[in-house]
Image: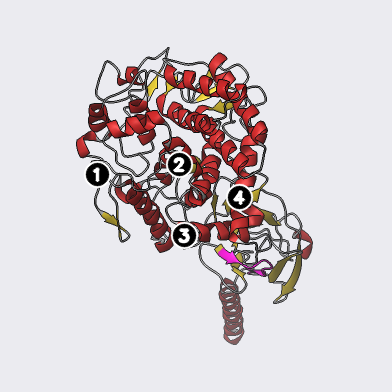
């Protein structure tokens, strides 16, 4: 009986021991693995951010998973897209017992473009598990270094750029007013300042035989007639924007619905240049000159001193009066405004207004060096390059001096600082180089911005380097060749170079702006022949006005 009891007890202990042993074993058995993306690589390179730049046109993308992928679930759950959302057709192969999926685009990717790889949670493993979370990788293709167009002589290239750029003003001149549309998508909205640039572009086009003298005269006659008879004016000054059909002011901003004295000065600069060009004694050219004189003489420059202050004001509104309260003070793009105000035969300003208002009693001076170049005037690092362009479409800076600066030195220094900054590339933007430079106001990834070394987000504006040809001819030619030959498939269009681009962000604008296209054709011509400089500086009233302000120049 005792033996039987012991046997039973031992049996129970054995069974119990087996049970405990089994429980321990089950506790240590790993659960079935989660289905997750372990790693992503592009051409055998990976990084934690899943961001890849300078990717070749035919990349190999490997997606490594923790367990085998159900091949049938790939469609719709592994997406290869352009930045616009358009899908990229790709092929798939597999490695590591279907734990690694290899994607290859069926055709070469476009250079300097952004792409994304999206792996969604709808992807399944062979055992039916769903992917634990969606993930994405971004790719940016590198520059295709091949030439996009045949190599031509430099002089032919300059001709081509001027001719193609001029087409903007010819094709986008408003059919009723002839004035330049603000941009290629602005409909009836035309720009007063950009139209002044357009007038000068037409003169270049005649000079280069892109159009005939008769064709150019007819277009400018239409513009001058509209400006005299239909365009709204405020104390003789035009608004920034007008309706090209009706001539009514189009507000540039909520309170900027009246006179814009700076934009008016760009318009007058162009009109005076045209007056000097169309110098024949026939009836039409004589009438054109008279019309231009009427427009110029009507601008009440001195009235914009706002109660005879010793400074000019930028805006006046019939609804908000002087509320914008923006004084025109240097150094910036507005030297031409003070020069024309001093040159007026009807409403002139005195030298005192120039010295106190514009030059701020000498406070426009700088004198510091940036990137190895001393800058006579203006903000640190020079500011946006349009400061060296807009006023100097007509004003010839060569040998031009006054009490504050040598303007040839100023504009060369400004351009070289901009060039040296981009070449040095302190912010490490992809694409910046000695061949890819130029920061100024233009369209932008996020809208519109005045780009310069202290406000730089990786956007290059072709107008910056190309309009600097008179100041930096070698550096500007290097940029021109890069823009045309290397980026031409993305940057060159029907009306010349598009407004802006960023290799760093893989972004290219599809827009054209009058105030950016105009300086390209004009300043290239000033570099080649001095045509616009010679015409504008030949104006008797301009000579007198500049002398009165204390300027000295071989042209005065």
Magenta-drawn segment: 53-65
Give the quarter of the image for residue 343. top left
- Numbered tag placed on residue 533 in the rendering: 2
Name the residue tied to disc 1: 365
How far apart are the two marked residues, 4 and 2, measured between alpha carbons? 20 Å
Relative to 12, does residue 153 appear above or below in the rendering?
Answer: above
Q: Point out the frontmost of discs 4 and 1.
A: 4
**Quadrant of the frame with the N terminus:** bottom right
How crowded pointer 2 is (Cα within 10 Å; few <14, some 14-19, many 20+) is rated as many
Reply above or below: 292 against 390.
Answer: above
Residue corresponding to mark 4 = 161
User: Tag 1's secondary structure?
Assistant: loop
Q: Which mark is residue 475?
A: 3
Kindly state the secondary structure of the residue where label 2 is placed: helix
Q: Is residue 426 left or right of residue 76?
A: left
Determine crowd level at label 3: few under 14, some 14-19, many 20+ residues with C-alpha closer than 10 A. Answer: many
Estimate how packed mark 4 is, as few (under 14), some (14 to 19) or many (20 or more) residues with alpha carbons within 10 Å. Answer: many
Which element type, helix, strand or loop, lies under badge 3? helix
Circles 2 and 1 in contact, beta carbons < 8 Å: no
In magenta stretch: residue 377: no
Asked whether the beta carbons under mark 4 and mark 3 sit within 8 Å of each other, the answer is no
Q: Nearer the viewer, mark 2 or mark 1?
A: 2
Within 10 angstroms of label 1, few (less than 14), some, or many (20 or more) residues? some
């Amino acid at each position: 009986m005792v033996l039987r009891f012991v046997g039973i007890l031992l049996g129970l202990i054995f069974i119990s021991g087996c049970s405990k042993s089994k429980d321990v074993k089950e506790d240590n058995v790993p659960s079935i693995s989660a289905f997750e993306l372990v790693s992503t690589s592009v051409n055998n390179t990976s990084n934690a951010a899943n961001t890849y730049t300078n990717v070749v046109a035919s990349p190999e993308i490997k997606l490594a998973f923790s367990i085998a992928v159900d091949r049938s679930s790939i469609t719709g759950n592994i997406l290869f897209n352009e930045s616009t959302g358009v899908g990229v057709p790709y092929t798939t192969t597999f490695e590591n017992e279907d734990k690694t999926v290899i994607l290859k685009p069926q055709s070469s990717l476009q250079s300097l473009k952004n792409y994304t790889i999206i792996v969604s949670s709808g992807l399944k493993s062979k055992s039916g598990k769903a992917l634990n979370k969606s993930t994405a990788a971004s790719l940016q293709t590198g520059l295709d270094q091949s030439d996009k167009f045949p190599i031509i002589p430099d002089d032919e290239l300059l001709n081509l750029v001027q001719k193609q750029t001029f087409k903007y003003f010819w094709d986008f001149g408003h059919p009723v007013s002839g004035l330049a549309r603000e941009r290629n998508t602005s409909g009836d909205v035309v720009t007063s300042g950009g139209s002044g640039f357009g007038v000068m572009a037409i003169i270049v086009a005649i000079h280069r035989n892109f159009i005939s003298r008769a064709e150019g005269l007819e277009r400018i006659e239409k513009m001058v007639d509209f400006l005299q008879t239909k365009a709204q004016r405020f104390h003789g000054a035009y608004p920034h924007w007008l309706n090209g059909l009706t001539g009514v002011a189009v507000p540039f901003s909520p309170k900027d619905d009246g006179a814009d004295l700076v934009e008016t000065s760009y318009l007058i600069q162009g009109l005076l240049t045209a007056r000097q060009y169309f110098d024949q004694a026939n009836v039409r050219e004589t009438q054109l000159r008279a019309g231009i004189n009427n427009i110029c003489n009507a601008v009440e420059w001195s009235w914009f001193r706002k109660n005879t202050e010793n400074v000019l004001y930028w805006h006046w509104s019939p609804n908000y009066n002087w509320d914008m309260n923006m004084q025109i003070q240097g150094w910036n793009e507005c030297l031409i405004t003070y020069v024309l105000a001093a040159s007026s035969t009807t409403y002139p300003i005195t030298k005192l207004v120039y010295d106190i208002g514009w030059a701020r009693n000498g406070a426009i001076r700088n004198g510091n060096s940036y990137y190895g170049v001393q800058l006579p005037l203006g903000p640190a690092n020079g500011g946006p390059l349009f400061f060296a362009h807009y006023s100097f479409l007509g004003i010839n800076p060569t040998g031009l001096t006054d009490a504050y600066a040598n303007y040839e030195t100023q504009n060369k220094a400004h351009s070289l600082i901009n060039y040296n900054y981009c070449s040095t590339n302190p912010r490490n933007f992809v694409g910046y180089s000695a061949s890819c430079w130029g920061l100024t106001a233009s369209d932008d990834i996020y809208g519109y911005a005045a780009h310069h070394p202290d406000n730089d987000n990786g956007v290059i504006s072709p107008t910056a380097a190309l309009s600097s040809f008179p100041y930096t001819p070698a550096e500007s030619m290097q940029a021109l060749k890069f823009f045309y030959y290397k980026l031409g498939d993305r940057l060159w269009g029907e009306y010349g170079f598009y407004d802006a681009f960023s290799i760093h962000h893989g972004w290219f604008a599809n827009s054209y702006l009058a105030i950016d296209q105009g300086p390209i054709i004009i300043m290239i011509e000033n570099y080649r022949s001095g045509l616009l400089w010679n015409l504008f500086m030949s104006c008797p009233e301009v000579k007198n006005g500049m002398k009165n302000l204390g300027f000295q120049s071989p042209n005065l």
